[in-house]
Amino acid sequence: MSTDTLDTGKLHTVEELEELSFELRTKLLHLCGTYEGAVHVGGDLSSADIFTALFEYGLRVDPTDLANPSRDRFVLSKGHAAVAMYIAMAIRGFFSYQGIVDTYGLLDSAYGMHPCKVQLPGVEASTGSLGHGLPLAVGMALGARHRGESHRVITLMGDGETGEGSVWEAAMAANSNRLGNLVAFIDRNRQLMTSFDEERVVLEPYPDKWAAFGWNVVHIDGHDMAALVGAIDALPATDSDKPTVVICETVKGKGVDFMERNLAWHAGSLGAADLERALAALETSREKESV
């Protein structure tokens, strides 16, 4: 397949993307209601809009041509949000959603709690150990530069993991090597597994830190689809010399009122009654936001 015909996914309107994001959240909750173990539902819900914007609008990748050298590379640094990524990929056409439901978390399943590139075609990096995604993405972006390739390398990080020193070493390396082909989206939901992040590691003034490390900084509402699309559209050319970070202010558990900003819902499962309650809350949230 030639570069000119590589599928970009940029055919959706903001309204259509919002519908796809609602579909992702709905399917996520249904999976939580069928899987017997815990799913990292809080961070999956906070990042659902970002995943939708990337896989349905931003990423230049063709699910039927995964080896195309011109494809954008995506690295999920917050590997515990793998379920949301799997569902976003299924909606985009990489594989079937039912396959996720039938095999998630089973021995030798392609759909593990953390993503594995050996098990699942379309996954560019096996991740889960926090603080590693940006360093991996820096290496990919630098390699692309040396090969004269023009694709982007995009990573999605959690804000909690940016307390890791490896993140800031990678941030310096990206600026030092003028990697304008590198973009980091950050799910800034301000929560860790058992606490709110500013109680443990003071990250603010957060945008200023990234700017001080030489990055182009974009700060948006991570649940505003129009803002996500605008940030993607405004990304500098891949041959520019400054990496970009898109800090997305989000709510952990977004869309399900009893999960939002609730530390108990970092991970969990849903019984039949809870699933019905969660789906009803999601529908109510959708109706409120559409007014």
Image (spheres, grey):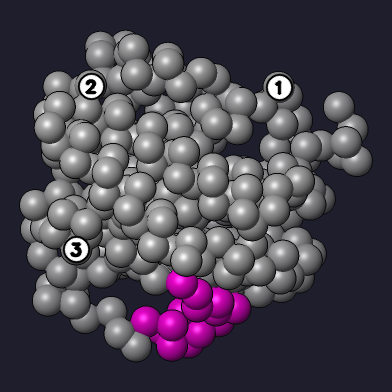
How many residues crowd mark 2 within 10 Å: few (<14), some (14–19), many (20+)?
A: some
* Upstream in sequence: badge 2 or badge 1: 2
Callouts 2 and 3 close, C-beta under 8 Å: no
* Upstream in sequence: badge 3 or badge 1: 1
Start-end of magenta stretch: 206-221
Q: Secondary structure at mark 2?
A: helix
x then y, percent, for residue 130: 30, 51
Q: Is residue 219 left or right of residue 61?
A: left
Identified at 43% across, 88% down, the residue is: 208
Identified at 27% across, 59% down, the residue is: 252
**Res 158 → quadrant:** bottom left
The kind of residue tagged 2 is: Thr
Q: Nearer the viewer, mark 3 or mark 1?
A: 3
Residue 173 can be seen, yes or no = no
Q: Between residues 246 and 97, which one lies in front from this camera angle?
A: 97
Q: Look at mark 2 in the image and give the residue it sits on.
A: 34
Quadrant housing the N terminus = top right
Instruction: Report the disc number at residue 64.
Output: 1
